[in-house]
Amino acid sequence: MKYIKGKKTTSLILITTVLISLFAFRKDTVFTEYEIKEFSFKGHDAKIVFPNKPNPNNYWIWRARFWGHEPQVDKALLEKGFHVAFIDVSNLFGNHEAVELWNEFYRFCVSEYGFNQKVVLEGMSRGGLIVYNWASKNTGKVFSIYADAPVCDIKSWPGGMFNGDGSPEAWEICLKAYNLDTLSVKTFDDIPVYNCVHVAKAGIPVMHVYGDADTVVPYAENTKLLAKKIRGTGGTIELIRKKGVGHHPHCLEDPSPIVDFILNSVDYKE
């Protein structure tokens, strides 16, 4: 059917909008045993999973990347009464815009749902960028950080300026997101390997899980440097090494060490 100006054009626009909405808010298939809200927040996909029996303190964990991938920790915490929150800012690579969006989403979660004023942060891969960049500017709002094969330096990934694989396509997007080029990025310091000192000084406990065969986000270029900086500033960080494991899969088959770390950080009581 050929559509022309007028009612038919309007109808086509409405139909297209409905179809886009249906695809954009397809029902989640990972947390089917829980109530979940999926919505758009400031133009970004967002999700909140509600525990079947909420903890009286309204604890929550904020996942920064790879929604639903290896959800062992999230599900274990849901059983402890935690909520799980997510907003997709992946293509902003933790830049100022991403931090501002997280500020707004944080205020929304706390005011709309009464979540605890402090949150546990979960950063997988590039999710490490926004987790640390946000935490370094909001230290009073963070219980702890669990990071898994996290990007701690954009020069490592997606830049590939050292020994890591890098990603030319993502690197181009990343540089634009930060308004940097291949020269100015060399002295740019608003990245986790530098701003983690604010996390350390605030006494926020940190845990990193990493694979020692990771060539995408190499340990030596990311977690190793960040851990040295945190410890040198008087902070604490626990490292869990996965022998012979690359960038994927994230998490642990038995997530107990991670879950225990998080529960201890919030002083959880049954």
Image (tube, rainbow, N blue to C red):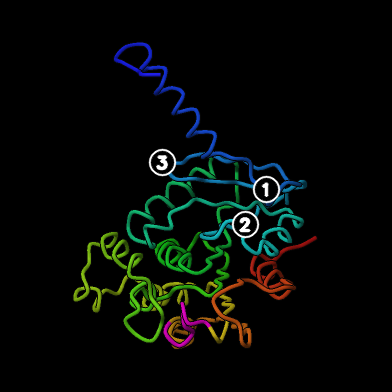
Residue 211 horizontal/vertical position (percent): 57, 82
> Viewed as shown, does residue 49 lie left or right of 7?
right
Residue 106 horizontal/vertical position (percent): 49, 50
Asked if the residue under mark 1 is in contact with the one under mark 2, i.e. CB atoms within 8 Å, the reply is yes
Q: Residues within 10 Å of mark 3 (few under 14, many from 20)?
A: few
Q: Is residue 18 above or below residue 111?
A: above
Q: Residues within 10 Å of mark 2 (few under 14, many from 20)?
A: some
Q: Quadrant of the C terminus?
A: bottom right
Tell me the magenta residue range: 214-221
Residue 196 horizontal/vertical position (percent): 42, 75
Circle 2: residue type: Gly
* Mark drawn on residue 29: 1
Q: Nearer the viewer, residue 256 or 110?
A: 256
Would residue 18 be seen by someone viewing this image from the given angle? yes
**Which residue is the site of mark 3?**
42
Residue furthest to the top in view is: 7
Q: Earlier in the sequence, mark 3 or mark 2?
A: 3
* Mark drawn on residue 68: 2
